[in-house]
Image (cartoon, rainbow, N blue to C red):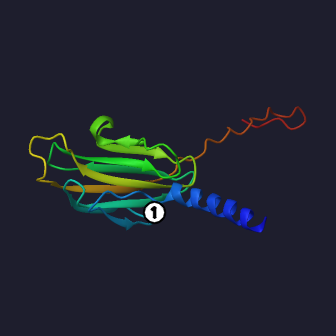
Amino acid sequence: MKALAATVAFCLVASVAFGQSPELQPGERLEKLQFPAATMELKGWTKLGNGRVYTLPVKAGQQVKISFATKSKFAFLSIFDLATPDEEAIFGTDEDGTSYTVTVKDNTTWLLRPYYSKASPRRGLGAPYSILVEPQATAPQPTAPAEQQSPSPLFPSRQ
C-alpha cells in the first residue's frame, strides 16, 4: 500500500514538474531568466534548432511587454505558457505582430522560443534577433471621488 501511495505521489510531482519544464529541440540551449526590474535585452542568433530558448517566470498582476526585432523576414518568436498542457503558443510574431503586452493572470513560467522558419526558401541560414523584456508600470487603481458634503444648515459655508 505504501508503494502505491509513493508511486501516485511521484506521478503527481512529475506531472507538475513536467508542466514547468520545456521540451527542447535538438541543438537548443536553455537559458533561465529572472523577471527584470528594468528593461532587459536578449540578443542572439537563431538557426533551425540551434539557438537559445529562454524561460521567464512571471507572477500574477505583473504587466510586461515583450518585443521581438530582426532584419530577417524568416525569423520569429513564439511564447508558450509552460503551465498549460497544450502546446499552443500564447503569442507568436508570425501572426500576432512584433510585441506582446499583457497583465499576467496567474503565476507561471513562459518559454520564449526564437526560431528560423523551416518553410523559408533560404532555410538553414539563420538570423540575428533582439528580444526586449520590459516590465510595465501598473496602472493606478481608480479611486472613487470623495463624496461632496452639502453645507450643514447649522454651519453655512462662507463665500
The three-letter amino acid code for the residue at tag 1 is: Phe
Report the residue at 22% width, 62% height from top.
44
Report the residue at 70% width, 66% height from top.
6
Q: Position of residue 87 (x, y in %)?
A: 43, 44
* Depth order, front residue of 141/25: 25
Q: Quadrant of residue 100?
A: top left
Q: Quadrant of residue 157?
A: top right
Q: Position of residue 86 (x, y in %)?
A: 48, 42
Q: Look at mark 1 in the image and give the residue it sits on.
A: 35
Q: Position of residue 152 (x, y in %)?
A: 86, 34
Which quarter shows the N terminus?
bottom right
* Depth order, front residue of 119/61: 119
Task: Using residue 73 as the reference point, say whether residue 2 is left or right of it.
Answer: right
100 lies above or below 20: above
Report the residue at 76% width, 37% height from top.
158
Tell which residue pokes out farthest to the left in this image.
122
Q: Secondary structure at mark 1?
A: loop
7 lies above or below 138: below
Q: How many marks?
A: 1
8 lies above or below 139: below
Tell which residue pokes out farthest to the right in this image.
154
* Depth order, front residue of 36/95: 95
Count residues near mark 1 (Cα–Cα under 10 Å), then give few for <14, some for 14-19, many for 20+: some
Report the residue at 43% width, 64% height from top.
36
Which quarter shows the C terminus?
top right
* Depth order, front residue of 59/50: 50
